Image: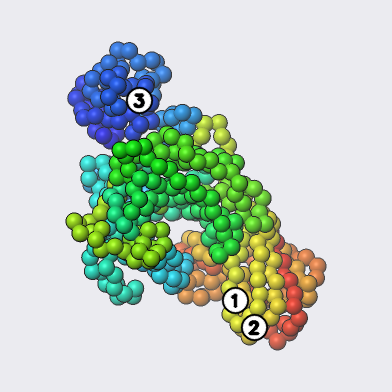
Amino acid sequence: MKRKQFISAILSAFAAAALTANARGLCATDMDYTADGAVDTFDLIAARKTASKEELLRLNDFILGKPVSNGGYTLIWSDEFDGNELNSDNWSYELGNWKTDSKGNYVTNGWGNNEQEFYTDSNTTVKDGILTIAARKEAYTDPVQGSYDYTSARLSSQYKFSTCGGRIEVRARCDSGKSLWPAIWMLPEDSVYGGWAASGEIDIMEGWGSTPEKICGTIHFGDVWPNNTYLTADYYFPEGSTSESWHTYAVEWDSDEMRWFVDDDLYSTQSEWYSVNRAYPAPFDQNFYLLLNLAVGGHFDGIDGIYADPATFADGEKHFDIDYVRVYSKNGDSFAPTQQTSAALSLYREGADAGLTNKDGCSVAHIVTVGEKPYSVMGLIESRHVSAGEKRTLSFTAQSTIERPITVTVEDAQYTRYLDETITVGTEPKQFSFTVPFSADMDADIKFLMGRVSDDVPSSEHDITLSGIQWK
């Protein structure tokens, strides 16, 4: 039962259907007076007579929509999936089968996992307080990405909600069947430590359709793929229960520890993560957003790590059902994103031999050969949103082991340049600052071109250090 239904029930002398204790952050031992595992009409009436002041205050806060304390945590964001459609203030659809960059350019198919489904905005429903993601065996053709035999949905809260730390809790169930891959997970709002997985990934729950007796919780971290690593643990359901049953999946995320739960049963604790060349607790000291999806096929449970099993869909579409998503802050905890003293760069190379290392406070490009083009070696900060009428200032300190020119640009997705400056970088550190005005809303890319920007670029091997990179 959802909040509006619950309020209505209270106002009509608790004439309402059952409400599970865990579904509202109320311990069963607090409010389940009939010991049947649910808070129903009779329990609520009895609670009015016998509950403690604290319990009644919590119940009253819930009815009034105020933040609800739950074991040292306070509710700060939730989606109870009331109504008849997905709340677009909370979620966006991620569409297609291809993994793309911030400009929509193709990177790889199958979302980097050999997934076989095409994600659409037509594979979800919201009804009776439940979000349902449906995976279907059906022909689907996209004019750009081609034809597929399966469809599903993938939802993201990116740019709508993200959090650093706290308790993230989701009540869900999923149909079983070979090649189904339900996931409740999180990615960084801004990849301040570099590309996946240097900036981290938190998997609250992933399930194998072929083995519904277990799920797992995982973190990915370390360095940019393929030099990343992970820590994971499996949870086996008690006898008689599987991932097809309703369960509450949660992670409690502190600055120095993460804990995974199923129905408040702690099954994994992790604290030994890192992001290369960064201070602990990086990368899990930044804001992360939520994702909900049901993949089909792929390396997690696909046949041969790729293919979907058509037999799974012999009796129709398969469902991943979500009752609610709730995020709590930890009471008395001031854990907040670590402020970055220098923005991380990603590296682009074309016909050059070069590498790039991001460290606390700086990025170092090691250039063996510069290539033939200005952008043959390029450090990138991509997709920084700006609004019409804004002015932003790019500031940084540059130093090189040999004196040479580099070009600094700020561009939109069509490569129109709003900043285009060639500077000389010497063996002593020098600070630079440029103010950039914008006449329209856009996602701007900041580029440090370190290839052959002129005929004066020396051919010898050298390092360029860019420190204190700020975009304000």
For residue 349, which numbered disc appears in the image? 1
> What's the residue at 64%, 48% (across, down)?
280
Of labels 1 and 3, earlier in sequence is: 3
User: Is any atom of residue 424 visible in this view?
Assistant: yes
- Closer to the eye: label 1 or 3: 3
The residue singled out by tag 3 in the image is 28
Of labels 1 and 2, earlier in sequence is: 1
- Closer to the eye: label 2 or 3: 3
Q: Is residue 304 above or below residue 267?
A: below
Question: Quadrant of the rendered structure where residue 136 is?
Answer: bottom left
Q: Are marks 1 and 2 in contact (CB under 8 Å)?
A: yes
> What's the residue at 46%, 71% (across, down)?
107
Q: Residue furthest top?
A: 49
Q: Nearer the viewer, residue 30 or 62?
A: 30
Dot 2 crowding, Cα within 10 Å, few <14, some 14–19, many 20+: many
Amino acid type, callout 2: Gly
The residue singled out by tag 2 in the image is 371
> For the residues marked 1 and 3, what is the alpha-carbon distance in whole angstroms?
58 Å
